[in-house]
Each structure stands twice: as structure tokens, then as C-alpha cells.
Image: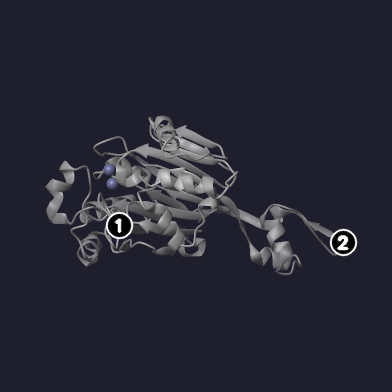
Amino acid sequence: MELIFLGTSSAIPTSRRNHSAIALKAFGEIMLFDCGEGTQLQLSKSKISPMKITRIFITHFHGDHILGLPGLIQSMAFMGRKEPLHVFGPKGLVSLINNVRNLGYYSLGFQIYMHEIIEGTILEEESYRVSCYPMKHTILNFAYKIEEKRRPKFIKEKALALGIKPGPNFGMLQKGIPVYVGNKTIMPEQVLGGERKGIKIVYSGDTCPSKDMVKFAEDADILIHESTFEAAYEDKSYETGHSTSKQAADIAKKAKVKKLFLTHISTRYKKSDLIEAEAREIFNNSVVAEDFMHVEVKRSNTE
Ligand SMILES: [Zn+2]
Ligand SMILES: [Zn+2]
């Protein structure tokens, strides 16, 4: 599983930080969270093909989170995309996407499924689920949570004791398929034990600090929380519906997440050190996300 930060700026992009967008490579898919202007160029620089994006999740309809959609969808059409695209977002998404499709003249050779979301589980797949919850911004903004489903743990010692050699048979049993060793059939239950915790990633979108986020992000492996301002700008931050470094870190601490990435950084900050240092005073495992930062999310690191 891999997270790629494509854009980490707030309302205005800079040469160093583009508008909001995060790609998640997981479960054989590429999912995109927000799609600010210029996202397709960021994708190109990250060597991620728009053709491989299966789903786009939009937190809210401020321009810095959606203005990349028209160009990205047009490029998908030009590249001859046939695979359907699923787009999730707050109420109003259908009209937004219909407007996007009517910008410029081109023919669309693929289906766009539009999902207007309300709080709760919005996507249930075999190996993962996605849920959302409204946060506190100047307009309706949904935070998203991607959860890998719990799976039984493979107990290597038991497999070895049964005479199974490491190799393809291990993988079969992990998938729940019986294997044949000598003249014996080994059933998956014989080598699978208690449940293995799945990876949990939460992305805030734009929000003031919210108690709902503490609950929503509880025990997440990774919380990506906006931190538009430094701690001294708490009033300004509140007025504009945003969070400060310390507020985001406080949420991470209270939610007992493993790692915090701060994003949506105001253009006034040319460097990340102040925001990062302030956050670390409260929650040590805090990092300011930078454009093109790749984060490998490994189960072994998160258990
Ligand atoms: Zn924003
Ligand atoms: Zn916003």
C-alpha cells in the first residue's frame, strides 16, 4: 500500500506546493482523494497513469479540491479510456460532474458513476471499506476513512510443523485454500489464527478541529489532517474553517493514531519546519507532507 501526496497547498498553489490531491495505491487500484487544479501534471510527474485511477473521492467543493477534474476527465477521454470511473462527493456532485463534462468539446467513451454521499459506509469491497463523516468547514466537507478488512493471521510455525515448506502453499493457505502435502490435506483453519488488524487511513479534507474527527480517526495507522496555519493564527484559522498545527496534532494524540501527516499548508510558509515543530510538541510522530512524498504503508510497521 502506498500513499503519494500530489498536492499539499491550501487555497493558492505555489511552485513547491500544488492544490490538494492524494493518490492511494492499494488493493490493486489507484484511488484519488481530492483533485485540485494541476493534479494531472502532478500525476504525470509521479508516473501515475490517469487510466489506472478507479475512484475519486472529493471532500468538498472548494476550487482547490475540485478544479483539476475537468482536465483530468478530458485526458482520460483522450487516452481512450473505456473503464468506468467512480466519483464520490457531497450532495451536488451529480450537477458538478455534469458541468465538468460539458466544459470543452470532446466525446466521453466511458461511464462516470457519481455517488452523492451521506455519512457512514459508502463503499464495501471484499478486502476493504470506505466510510465518510462530515467535519467542520465553511461548507459541507467529508473526511474519508479507508479500512482494510480484518483477516485471519497466518501462523508460520504451525504450517512448518505440519510439514509445509515456505512457498506457494503458504500463499494458498493464507487465501483460505486447502493444500495437499504428501497424501495429507491441510485445511486453512489448521494454520490460521486470531484476526490480523487491517490498515486504517483517514483523510480530513478541510476542517476546524473536531471531536467527531477524534472518534472517526480512532486508532488509525495514518491520519492525514489539514494544518493550514501555525498555532499563533488560531483565530484566523477558526474564521476560515481550518486547523492549526497544534490543533491537528492534538486530534492525532486524542485519536491515538500511529502517524500524522499535515497537509493543506498556507502559502505564507516557505518552509515546513515551524508547522512540523509545533505539531511535534504535542504529537511526536508528525510530519508535514510535501508534494511528491511517497509513503509506504506496511502492515509490519503498523502492528
Ligand atoms: Zn482547501
Ligand atoms: Zn475548503
Left or right? Give the position of 183 relative to 284.
Answer: right
Q: The disc labelled 1 sits on which kind of residue?
A: Leu
Identify the mark at residue 133; answer none if there is no mark.
none
Query: Please, what is the three-letter code of the amino acid marked with disc 2?
Result: Asn
**Exactly how many numbered labels are in the figure?**
2
Query: Which of the 4 image quadrants contains residue 119?
Result: top left
Tell which of 162 and 115 is nearer to you.
Answer: 115
- Mark 1 touches mark 2? (CB < 8 Å): no
Q: Tell me the crowding category of disc 1: few under 14, some 14 to 19, or many 20 or more residues within 10 angstroms, Cα based.
A: many
Asked if the beta carbon under badge 1 is closer than 8 A to the nearest atom of ligand 1, the reply is no
x, y (%) of residue 91?
38, 30
Label 2 C-beta lies within 8 Å of the nearest ligand 1 atom: no
The part of the image, by quadrant, that contains residue 272 is bottom left
Q: Is residue 298 visible?
A: yes
Q: Which residue is mark 2?
A: 183
Of label 1 and label 2, which has the lower sequence position? Answer: 2
Q: Nearer the viewer, mark 1 or mark 2?
A: 1
| Residue located 42% across and 40% down the image | 104
On screen, 80 above or below 221? above
User: As displayed, is residue 170 above or below residue 255?
Assistant: below
In percent of the image, x 39 and y 42: which residue is there? 58
> Residue 210, image x and y in percent?
26, 42
- Give the percent coordinates (x, y) of residue 100: 41, 37
Q: CA distance from mark 1 to mark 2?
A: 56 Å
Above or below, 58 relative to 18: above
Q: Which residue is mark 1?
A: 262
Measured as percent of width and height from the top left, residue 234 is found at 14, 49
Which residue is drawn at the image coordinates 21% and 57% (left, top)?
A: 267
**In the image, is 5 to the left or to the right of 193?**
left
Viewer can see residue 148: no
Q: Secondary structure at mark 2?
A: loop
